[in-house]
Image: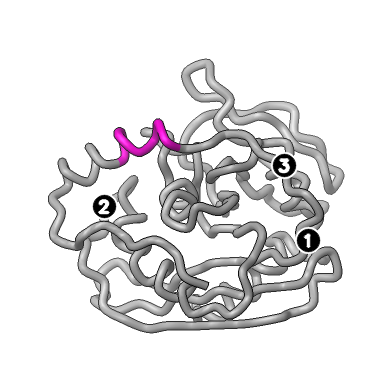
C-alpha cells in the first residue's frame, strides 16, 4: 500500500496550528462503506519525553475479524509533545507503517480523536487526509465536549456536543465499562463510524483491530 507523505518535521507550533485550521476544511464528513473486506487498526507507542516510537497497524478481515496482516515500524519522532498537536508527532511513523502494508484496508480505526478536537482536526482526520481513505477516531478519553443519557447496555451511544455542534459520540462497547469516544476521521459519517466500531468489538472495551495494534505497538 502506498499512501501520501506527512508534513515536514521542522514545524513551529503556530505553523502546525495553521495547518490544522486550513486542512480541517478538507475533511469529508460523509461516506458509506460498501461491503468492506478489510479493517485496520493503527496505534503508536510514543512516550512524552521519548525520541523514538513504535507504530503498528493490524489488518483484519471483515466481518470475520481474523488477522490478515500485522506490520510495525520503529523510528525517531521530531515534534514535541503538545496537546492538540499530537498528529504532527505521530503521523510520520503511522503513515510509514501503513505504507508497508501489502493489503489495502477499506477503513482505518485510529487510536485518537477525529472531529472531536478543538480545531476539528484530530489525529484520525490528519491520517485520513494523508491516506485518502475512510478513517474513524476511537479514543479512550474525552478531549472536549459533553454528553448525556448514555445507556448501560453495549451498543448504547450519546452525542458529544461542543459549542452547539455534534462532534462525536460516546459509545458503550461493553457493559459496566467506560465508553469509547468515536468521531469522524475522513470519508465516513458518524453513524457509520459508530456502527463499524461496534461491529469490530469482540468482548473487550476496545475494538479488536485497535486492541491488537495497541499490543503490537507495545503501548
Q: Residue at x 55, y 74 (%)?
A: 57
CB contact under 8 Å: marks 1 and 2: no
What's the mark number on residue 201? 1
Specify whether residue 110 is painted magenta.
no
Tell me the element at label 1. Answer: loop
Instruction: Indicate whether 169 appears above or below 105.
Output: above
Q: Residue at x 66, y 39 (%)?
A: 31
Instruction: Indicate whether 117 appears above or below 72.
Output: above
Q: Position of residue 5 (x, y in %)?
A: 34, 62
Q: Position of residue 169 (x, y in %)?
A: 65, 36
| Quarter occupied by residue 68 | bottom right
Pointer 1: residues within 10 angstroms few (<14), some, or many (20+)?
A: some
User: Which of 120/162 is in front?
Assistant: 120
Overall secondary structure of the magenta section: helix
Which residue position is annotated with label 2? Answer: 82
Q: Which one is closest to the eye, mark 2 or mark 3?
A: 3
| 3D distance between C-alphas at marks 1 and 3 | 20 Å
| Quarter occupied by residue 95 | bottom left
What's the mark number on residue 26? none
Mark 2 or mark 3, which has the lower sequence index? 3
Q: What range is drawn magenta here?
A: 20-26
Q: Which one is closest to the eye, mark 1 or mark 3?
A: 3
User: Which of 145/198 is in front?
Assistant: 198
Q: Position of residue 125 (x, y in %)?
A: 46, 46
Mark 1 or mark 2, which has the lower sequence index? 2
Tell me the element at label 2. Answer: loop
Q: Residue at x 54, y 49 (%)?
A: 141
Mark 1 or mark 3, which has the lower sequence index? 3
Q: Residue at x 53, y 59 (%)?
A: 111
| 3D distance between C-alphas at marks 2 and 3 | 33 Å
Tell me the element at label 3. Answer: loop
Which residue position is annotated with label 3? Answer: 32
Amino acid at each position: 500500500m502506498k499512501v501520501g507523505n506527512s508534513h515536514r518535521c521542522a514545524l513551529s507550533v503556530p505553523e502546525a496550528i495553521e495547518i490544522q485550521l486550513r486542512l480541517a476544511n478538507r475533511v469529508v464528513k460523509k461516506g458509506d462503506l460498501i461491503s468492506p473486506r478489510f479493517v485496520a487498526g493503527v496505534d503508536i507507542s510514543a512516550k512524552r519525553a521519548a525520541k523514538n516510537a513504535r507504530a503498528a497497524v493490524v489488518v483484519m478481515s471483515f466481518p470475520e475479524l481474523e488477522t490478515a496482516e500485522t506490520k510495525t515500524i520503529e523510528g525517531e519522532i521530531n515534534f514535541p509533545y503538545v496537546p492538540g498537536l499530537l498528529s504532527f508527532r505521530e503521523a510520520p511513523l503511522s503513515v510509514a507503517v501503513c505504507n508497508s502494508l501489502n493489503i489495502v484496508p477499506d477503513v482505518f480505526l485510529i487510536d485518537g480523536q477525529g472531529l472531536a478536537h478543538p480545531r476539528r482536526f484530530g489525529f484520525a482526520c490528519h491520517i485520513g487526509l494523508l491516506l485518502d481513505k475512510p478513517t474513524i477516531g476511537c479514543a479512550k478519553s474525552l478531549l472536549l465536549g459533553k454528553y448525556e443519557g448514555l445507556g448501560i447496555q453495549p451498543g448504547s451511544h450519546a452525542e458529544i456536543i461542543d459549542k452547539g455542534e455534534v462532534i462525536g459520540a460516546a459509545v458503550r462497547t461493553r457493559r459496566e465499562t467506560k465508553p469509547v469516544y468515536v468521531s469522524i476521521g475522513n470519508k465516513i459519517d458518524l453513524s457509520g463510524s459508530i456502527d463499524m466500531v461496534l461491529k469490530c468489538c469482540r468482548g473487550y472495551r476496545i475494538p479488536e483491530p485497535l486492541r491488537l495494534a495497541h499490543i503490537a505497538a507495545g503501548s
